[in-house]
Amino acid sequence: MTFPQDNRPKTDGVVALVGNPNTGKSTIFNALTGLKQHTGNWPGKTVSIARGTFRVGAQKYLLVDLPGTYSLRAGSPEEKITRDFLLSGRPHVTVVVADAGRLERNLYLVLQVLEITGKVVVCLNMLDDARRRGICVDVRALEEELGVPVVAAAARQGLGLQELKGKIDALARGEISVCPRRVKYDPDIEEQLAFMSGTRWLALEALLGQQKPGEGSWVERFKYCPV
Amino acid sequence: MSRLPPGQKAEVRRLLGEGPLKFRLLDLGFVPGTTVEAVRRSPLGDPVAFCVRGALVALRSKDADLVLVEVLPGDQRRGACP
Ligand SMILES: Nc1nc2c(ncn2[C@@H]2O[C@H](COP(=O)(O)OP(=O)(O)OP(=O)(O)O)[C@@H](O)[C@H]2O)c(=O)[nH]1
Ligand SMILES: [Mg+2]
């Protein structure tokens, strides 16, 4: 997905909204932009890219609502749209919307996004729902672990959205420094990655497409992929 | 995994197959050690739905067959879905 420069409305930065299906991305998009993207309680509603603008003080940002995905591996059209936008659209800030009640699943995408960019704000949404189910998240500890800002929110009730806007703005203006958490792979994989330049995610994609001489594909060597 | 009756919980042991399909299953959360629960099957038996790491995921039964699981007794483990 290319995003021609001349097509870009004049703004102070592009902000992408990504996350698992049904985590409240469009709800946040609507609340911030005042537009009316389709929302509802089933996954896969957003199938294309929606754009709108919002302001923080004098700054004006272009917000891009992307389809929900569990992964960026481009196995489905939604994954491909989202992956391509993060890699070629080069948003200034990426907001990963995560369901506070399903953190384990949602953090997988967070770690993948951190392999593309460190300019990330994690929006821990559905906090009301999680609380009702007796789930309590230590937001500061999570922030510490991930090395990027984490904002707690309940978007349907409008809670946490001011803080979210503030963090997006601060990150876009370089007022917050980040130290994005990197997944460490096996030493032989890390050794290969060290030789490759550019985005870690693209290097990993390239590596996964290669055969490791004599020992099957690199895929089998990944720790998080036990056979 | 495709033969699990609805309501049955199991633990993922191993994935068969190679390449993109295997990655797809891992991306969806079918990682060894994960608890899954069969939820329902459509009248023709395909696709089959599973609760895995908090989400409902539907698979073609021939893809579900690539996931080898060990049946867990009763409600020994917490449900995979809320
Ligand atoms: N309880 C609760 N529900 C929420 C919250 N935010 C959004 N929702 C609801 O969750 C459902 C999904 O919201 P959407 O905004 O459509 O989610 P999405 O991430 O855009 O979904 P896809 O585009 O399908 O990936 C809707 O019914 C929302 O009203 C929240 O903070 N708490
Ligand atoms: Mg949406």
Image (tube, rainbow, N blue to C red):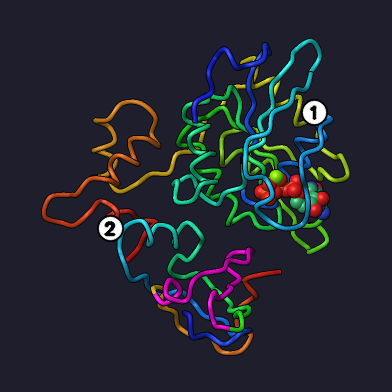
The C terminus of chain B, quarter of image: bottom right
Residue B64 is inside the magenta segment: yes
What residue do we see at 75% from left, 35% from top?
A29
Residue A220 is inside the magenta segment: no
Mark 2 falls within which chain? A
Q: Earlier in the sequence, mark 2 or mark 1?
A: 1
Asked whether the residues under the numbered discs 2 and 1 touch, taking CB atoms below 8 Å apart as contact, a structural biologist would say no
Mark 1 falls within which chain? A
Q: From the top left corner, tell me how far across and down residue B18 is, in percent.
A: 30, 62
Helix, strand, or loop for circle 1?
helix
What residue do we see at 64% from left, 64% from top?
B54
Q: CA distance from mark 2 to mark 1?
A: 44 Å
Tell me, yes or no, if residue A186 can be seen here: yes
Q: Name the side, left or right, on which A126 lies relative to A10.
A: right
Q: From the top left corner, tell me how far across and down residue A27 is, in percent.
A: 78, 42
Q: Which residues are magenta?
A: B44-65
Disc 1 residue crowd, few under 14, some 14–19, many 20+, Cα 10 Å? some
Helix, strand, or loop for circle 2?
helix
Disc 2 residue crowd, few under 14, some 14–19, many 20+, Cα 10 Å? some
Which amino acid, by three-letter code, is at mark 2? Glu
Q: Which of the 4 quarters of the picture holds residue A104? A: bottom right
Residue furthest to the right: A157
Residue on which disc 1 sits: A33
What residue do we see at 74% from left, 41% from top?
A26
Asked whether the residues under marks 2 and 1 belong to the same chain, the reply is: yes
Q: Which of the 4 quarters of the picture holds residue A162? A: top right
Residue furthest to the left: A214
Q: Please state the total of marks drawn on the protein image.
A: 2
Q: From the top left corner, tell me how far across and down residue A23 is, in percent.
A: 70, 49
Q: Which mark is residue A213?
A: none
Which amino acid, by three-letter code, is at mark 1? Thr
Residue on which disc 2 sits: A220
